[in-house]
Image (cartoon, rainbow, N blue to C red):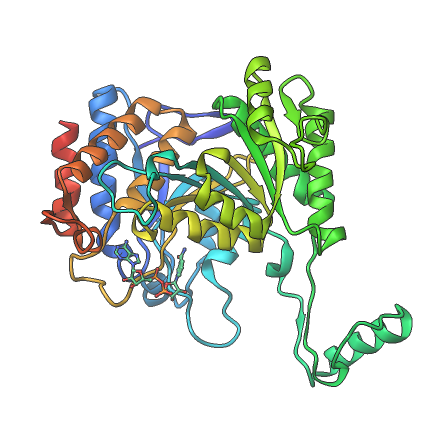
């Protein structure tokens, strides 16, 4: 038994026993889901005793759904996520065969989950390729519905590609297509509405959590009317809608080094004095370098779909890889949110007890925070950090840690639960 989460005037109303639909997922999804739920349940019990509890409700997707219903993503499953607003899922295998969309993409599109949120933080004890991983604390807001992911592509030789090429050359006067006879085309839609809703949420997130900055990551020097417009719309929105709370680099171009670049340190000091969130922008390639060299310069990152894809994996690798990187797909306007492990189904280790459940557990932590159950979320984080610092870990981390103890997926969950207790 449980009750529905609802949204009222943009605010979630969470009952003490919210119904949470979950998809176990394929491959290692089946291995990590139950252990992750046990960890979350233990933390909630520790924080609230009997007064709060998640009412888990399994819904079908992937192979399990196909076997039972002949459909990889039954309508009922979509309806349950719509009805209960907030859910969680393990990884789903993309079915091979024509005409079947990625199930993840279908879920995101149906619920218009336009924010892909990935927090990136380091846990003490986790092996990292960088020297000071403790300085990493970033929160990626990746736009989830636009960009070249829209899938508008024309293959060279195809009639549509020829039509499109002729249109560009004859009607638009394009002269830059180097090899017209063998060119394929892809379209990159980036809208003002789509950019604004993402950037607005990213800024609000930084304000709500007292985070120092929002970096708009873009390649606007080359793609002026898509990525460049994203940056400009972002600055406009920050200045128009958040005037009292932010401090944009564009407004403060006088804070410059001798070479004419914005002086990040001075801007930070200035913002600290005023208690405002800094809004800045960095070109994507520079960001990939800068986030490795100066991770402390970046806090919230707002970017478009493709950049977000690249950035997410690099930042995840800096703090221990995909086995421990959580994620969520959210529509902050409707309240719909699906929390998910960011890795795939890992068929090479499915059923062996080698899977690290941390990614799904941490996605669960994000879900607890989204519900406002922060005390329970804190218990999980503390207990996980304990497990890592005792070097009691699953095989992915064991392989990189000296003097570690190897645990199975279930044993690792038990280790966290014993730390909670
Ligand atoms: P993958 O993430 O499944 O695996 C990549 C590597 O990381 C493998 O070596 C795997 O063993 C390892 N790995 C992944 N998660 C791990 C964990 N929790 N603990 C320890 N090791 C882990 O990527 P892939 O092999 O490219 O994809 C396999 C399938 O998953 C494909 O069908 C793909 O479409 C699907 N996929 C689903 C999602 C999703 O549901 N969100 C995301 C990515 C890929």
Location of residue 386 (image quadrant):
top left
Q: Residue furthest front?
A: 258
Residue 399 visible to the viewer = yes
Residue 84 lies, in percent from the top left, at 44, 38
Q: Quadrant of the C terminus?
A: top left
Residue 341 visible to the viewer = no
262 left or right, relative to 366: right
Residue 16 lies, in percent from the top left, at 34, 23
Quick one: 384 or 278, which is closer to the camera?
A: 278
Residue 36 lies, in percent from the top left, at 24, 43
58 left or right, relative to 306: left
Q: Quadrant of the N terminus?
A: top left
Residue 260 lies, in percent from the top left, at 70, 36
User: Number of marks in the image?
Assistant: 0
Please say if 240 is above or below 289. above
Location of residue 50 (image quadrant):
top left
- Residue appearing at x 63%, y 53% in the figure: 146
Please say if 412 is above or below 213. below
- Residue appearing at x 42%, y 47% in the figure: 315
Quadrant location of ligand 1?
bottom left
- Residue appearing at x 22%, y 55% in the figure: 396
Quick one: 335 or 60, which is closer to the camera?
A: 335
Quick one: 29 or 386, which is closer to the camera?
A: 386
Quick one: 415 or 258, which is closer to the camera?
A: 258
Please say if 245 is above or below 118. above
- Residue appearing at x 69%, y 86% in the figure: 157
């Amino acid at each position: 038994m449980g009750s529905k989460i609802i949204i009222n005037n943009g605010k979630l109303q969470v009952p003490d026993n919210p119904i949470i639909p979950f998809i176990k997922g394929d491959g290692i999804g089946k291995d990590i889901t139950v252990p992750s739920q046990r960890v979350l349940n233990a933390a909630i019990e520790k924080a609230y005793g009997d007064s709060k509890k998640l009412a888990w409700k399994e819904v079908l997707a992937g192979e399990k759904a196909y076997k039972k219903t002949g459909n990889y993503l039954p309508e009922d499953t979509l309806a349950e996520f719509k009805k209960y607003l907030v859910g969680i899922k393990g990884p789903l295998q993309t079915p091979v065969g024509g005409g079947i969309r990625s199930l993840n993409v279908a879920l995101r599109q149906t619920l218009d989950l336009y924010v892909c949120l990935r927090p990136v933080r380091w846990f003490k004890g986790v092996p990292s390729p960088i020297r000071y991983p403790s300085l990493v604390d970033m929160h990626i807001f990746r736009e989830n519905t636009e960009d070249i992911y829209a899938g508008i592509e024309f293959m060279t030789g195809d009639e549509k590609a020829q039509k499109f090429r002729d249109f560009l050359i004859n009607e638009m006067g394009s002269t830059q297509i180097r090899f017209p006879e063998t060119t394929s085309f892809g379209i990159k839609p980036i809208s003002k509405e789509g950019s604004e809703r993402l950037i607005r949420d990213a800024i609000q997130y930084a304000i709500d959590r007292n985070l120092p900055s929002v970096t708009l990551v873009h390649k606007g020097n080359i793609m002026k009317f898509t990525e460049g417009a994203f940056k400009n719309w972002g600055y406009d929105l920050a200045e128009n809608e958040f005037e009292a709370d932010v401090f944009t680099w564009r407004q403060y171009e006088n804070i410059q080094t001798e070479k004419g670049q914005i002086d990040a340190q001075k801007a930070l000091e200035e913002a600290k004095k005023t208690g405002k969130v800094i809004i800045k922008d960095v070109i994507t390639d520079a960001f990939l370098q800068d986030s490795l060299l100066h991770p402390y310069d970046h806090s919230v990152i707002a970017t478009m779909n493709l950049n977000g894809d690249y950035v997410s994996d690099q930042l995840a690798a800096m703090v221990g890889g995909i086995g421990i990187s959580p994620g969520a797909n959210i529509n902050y306007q409707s309240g719909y949110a699906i929390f998910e492990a960011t890795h795939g189904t890992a068929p090479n280790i499915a059923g062996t007890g080698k899977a690290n459940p941390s990614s799904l557990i941490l996605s669960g932590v994000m879900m607890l925070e989204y519900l406002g159950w922060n005390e329970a979320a804190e218990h999980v984080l503390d207990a996980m950090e304990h497990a890592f610092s005792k070097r009691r870990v699953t095989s992915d981390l064991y392989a990189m840690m000296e003097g570690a103890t190897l645990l199975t997926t279930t044993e690792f969950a038990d280790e966290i639960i014993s730390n909670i207790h």
